[in-house]
Image (cartoon, rainbow, N blue to C red):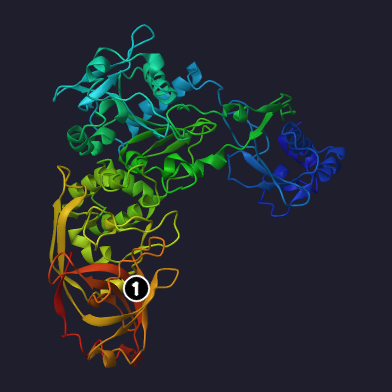
Amino acid sequence: MGSDTLQTQFSCNVCEDLASGQWRYWSDYQSVSQLHVGIENGCEICRILKEGIKASGQETDVMWSLVDTGAGEPLHMRLRSKSGTNWKGNLEFYTRSKHPSRWPAFGVGREVSIDPLSEGCVNLVSDWINDCTREHIDCSGPHPTVLPTRVIDVGSEFEEPKLRISNSSESAKYAALSYCWGKIPFLKTTASTLSKHKAGIPFDKLPETFRDAILLCRKLQIRYLWIDALCIIQGSKEDWEKESTKMAQVYGNAYVTLVAFISQNTYEGCFPRKRHLATSVEIPCQGADGTMPSIYVRNALSAQHEELLVWNESNTLTTRGWCFQESLMSRRLLIFTDTTIVWDCLTIRECECSPKPLDPIREGYHSLRRSCANSIRDDLSSDTLHAAWTVVVDSYTKRDFSHITDRLPALSAIAESMARWTNDTYIAGLWKGAIVPGLLWQNIAGWRESRKRLSPYYAPSWTWASVTGMIFFDEDEEFATKRKCSVIEAVCVPATLNPFGPAKSGHLKLRSMIFDVSLVLPPNEFAGVEFRIRGSHEDALGHIEEYSATLDVCDEGIYEIKDGAEHKIILITYTADYARFLLLQASNNVPGAFERIGQGSMALPTEAGSSRGIESDAGSTEEITLV
């Protein structure tokens, strides 16, 4: 009997679109009883769907809906309670590549092994690495590469791992580990343990995450592994300052970076804890040629794939500040999620649950990773990279730090890469060639913590790096064509050996339209403050009584406003009817200079489409120094 005949025979009102191959997204949930009707009429597909629901243990009090995930992909089913108040989970139905189904709706999946160190898993990972190193142009790089200052020699079943001191020209393949330290103490290399670790590190004294990484490297025949806690001397400021400047090379040159995506501390291990949830249930069915090519059902695994992007804030690792640049700098990531292993290189993303590549990486993220991993192409202009930098800061400042003073060092590898490809000068979180748009940052209220100015001095007040909290940039193309502010001088002196770390001092000299203002106190609960324009410029702005600005700092009702201090605003950009400005306060430390304390925007009154007063007064600009 031919497949066309069988498809016609098995079609029904419940799933006829599946049988015909023209399946669609069902927005309405249906009851399991409807599947029973299809089964009574001889529908094989309804039987498969019903068996899948039964296998999930959700057969009673459940409604189901199917989701079209694209040709060749597993068929997804969403489950919820009959009342609609409780989500019951997602299932996926699939066939195996050697035994495809006659129904196109059931795409191909791949089984997930319970043991991530099994021969099948290790072979799959080896294939990913080999395909990437041999065939992916974007991922190409010299291998072996010069080893970091120190690496872990992973040893063998009969030999303990040990810390190896590399010579300056020694080359070899090595893996790097990206993980979350957590708050539970664990074994580290210190000045007192350095000699012991060079002789050998007892395997059973290492936390589980380190042990898992070492075991995998042994299986993959990668002799060396870089782990920051073991390869940087902890407690040594000198070694930290020296080694932290090399993060771009450490992760950029790694043969592969192992990402312990799910672990909240070093004792939870690299490998997925819920791999048992990826096991499937077999549903036999008759094939068109008389064979029995089974359909398989399991908990949907692809729902986790979107969580792997570095912009996601819902996972412990993706909220850790240091892991941000570790992911972006690496050419190849091997990511251990809750249930599966995912491959993510500069060219492709794949998962062990499917023989097909995952959805393409978001272009902005992909371009940024290519540039950071030293695989940039000529079509990425400096403007493109400067724009990407604001995306970096937006996402990066959502992340957590055990030590807030790591905020710039943990971004220094990305900054170093950007500097190399833009040939621009880095100034404590901003770029000399993009200072004006870089000034238009906002410290968003209500994100996890109070917004504070870092103390002791960390960076100039005009850069986002001087404050805590989430930073957001807001500039459009219209602003870029109407810039009013010009940069006379921008200087920043690094506080450490790392030129991309915190600053010792810095100043910015600007020329623009500047107005004296009087503040109307106190600020409101959202750190907003009202002000009035003083002096002759009041008429130029159309006699509007008050404007508002948002303060950069709001620490439980404590603000930076000083009684009796002089305040000004400086226009950074403006259009015919709209301006962006900074709110400034006279500095107590540098006579004649001002500090940024806030920012805002104002509507400008217009006549016949042009800004009254502002356009005609365009020549009345002055210089001011910000510190």
Quadrant in which the N terminus is drawn: top right
The residue shown at (35%, 23%) is 187
Identify the amino acid type marked 1: Gly
Which quadrant of the figure has residue 550?
A: bottom left
Residue, disc 1: 600
Report x, y in % for residue 249: 23, 35
Report x, y in % for residue 421: 20, 49
Q: Is 162 placed above or below 381 here?
A: above
Looking at the image, can residue 447 be seen? yes
Farthest residue, direction top: 158
Image-based side of 63 in relation to 72, left or right:
right
Which quadrant of the figure has residue 298?
A: top right
Q: Is 617 placed above or below 96 here?
A: below
The residue shown at (48%, 37%) is 357
Q: Nearer the viewer, residue 106 or 146?
A: 146
Label 1: few (<14), some (14–19) or many (≥20) C-alpha neighbours in 10 Å: many
Quadrant in which the C terminus is drawn: bottom left
Image-based side of 47 in relation to 150, left or right:
right
Report x, y in % for residue 489: 12, 65
Image-based side of 260 in relation to 19, left or right:
left
The residue shown at (21%, 59%) is 460
Report x, y in % for residue 526: 44, 68
How many numbered marks appear? 1
Q: Is 199 placed above or below 621 here?
A: above
